[in-house]
Image (cartoon, rainbow, N blue to C red):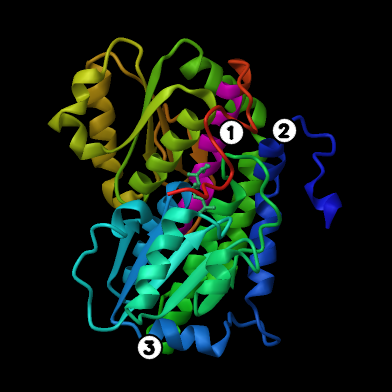
Amino acid sequence: DASDIEKGTYPHYMLKEIDEQPAVLRKIIQAYQDENGNLSLEQETLEAINGADRIYVIAAGTSYHAGLVGKEYFEKLAGVPTEVHISSEFGYNMPLLSEKPLFVFISQSGETADSRQVLVKVKELGHPSLTVTNVPGSTLSREADHTVLLHAGPEIAVASTKAYTAQVAVLAILASLAAEAKGKEIGFDLIQELGIAANAVQTMIVRKEEMEGLSFDFLELSRNAFFIGRGLDYHVSLEGALKLKEISYIQAEGFAGGELKHGTIALIEEGTPVFALATQEAVSPNIRGNVKEVGARGAKSCIISMEGIEEEGDRIVIPAVHPMLTPLVSVIPLQLISYYAALHRGCDVDKPRNLAKSVTVE
Ligand code: AGP
């Protein structure tokens, strides 16, 4: 539907697509529910997942970051060992494969050449494949054995936003269905928790002005920025850094909090911005420790935590959601902060230099 891809009153597609995320999450909840209100998936797709002794996720960029979150879901909810690989690496340097691998390609566009070359090789080897994509009929969808759709609607801005949250939600659904098929209890009602997360995303979106202020405060004068986290928060920190560098051209790095002291902390100077994600209760004290370490070297830190485990001084506190679903919500302030940083620098937000929406060359 062409009217779907009009900007309307929005100055940029990116902002429109950020705003669409609660609706996309609700659409996904609907799309994967059967008439009895249970999560469901095509039988054949489910069998492909359940027939695997190991999942190999293949993706690039933001989709790779969603895959890292997906690994946690497949392993922690369904008990399926999962590896996540950058497509351009995997094709030319294949790891040892398990006996019954399933290849899961995550690609918003379904056209990424680096991922496609892996699919071609995997098919030659006779292994089953599943594509998670936003575009029905795309190359990766047509060529894989199975397809699972993101239902995010067309994503026009080069910087991926709603496709990321859609990927995370769909991967959670796949993992919970895999768990169910194995007779495993995931211990929470995923439909309900995704609904709660959609509301929390809405809450964060409404806080645009505040995010604009933080963006200005932390990034106006910086040439670089760090994003740190542990566990799920680490995966989100990688996405936060990619978003920022891609559209604002500020050099940014996502880092595992504990790894900083092994070298990167040398880059911290007076005023260096550090965005620290602290939504995971078990490792929140550790990441707060890392914030102190960088603070002692002059860093200016913006802690992003969650209701219930927040502490005084945290700059962004997201509403409480299920601890496995925090990436859906904590990524929103990072998307917005990047958006405003790019805007304030006069960058072409929707079409950053040197980049294409889908990378169709290897
Ligand atoms: C995301 O903001 C980027 N533009 C980019 O990393 C993108 O996610 C990557 O090129 C993969 O694209 P795909 O999901 O269409 O395969």
Sort mark 3 into few (<14), some (14-19) or many (20+) by Cα contacts within 10 Å: few
Residue that label 3 marks: 182
- Disc 2 on helix, strand or loop? loop
Q: Which residue is drawn at 39% across and 61% down?
A: 58
Check residue 12 in the rendering and tell me which mark sits there, or answer none: 2
Counting from the top left corner in percent of width and height, residue 65 is at 41, 50
Give the left or right position of residue 146, taking residue 22 as reference. Answer: left
- Magenta span covers which residues? 324-342
Marks 1 and 3 sit apart, C-alpha to C-alpha, by 39 Å
- Disc 3 on helix, strand or loop? loop
Q: Which residue lies furthest to the left in this view?
A: 262
User: Taking the image as drawn, is residue 202 in sight?
Assistant: yes
Counting from the top left corner in percent of width and height, residue 189 is at 52, 73
Sort mark 2 into few (<14), some (14-19) or many (20+) by Cα contacts within 10 Å: some
Identify residue type, mark 2.
Answer: His
Sort mark 1 into few (<14), some (14-19) or many (20+) by Cα contacts within 10 Å: many
Check residue 336 in the rendering and tell me which mark sits there, or answer none: 1
Q: In this view, does 18 lie above or below 183?
A: above
Instruction: Based on the picture, tell me whether residue 333 belongs to the magenta stretch.
Output: yes
- Disc 1 on helix, strand or loop? helix
Query: Can you tell which of label 1 and label 2 is closer to the viewer?
Result: 2
Identify residue type, mark 1.
Answer: Leu
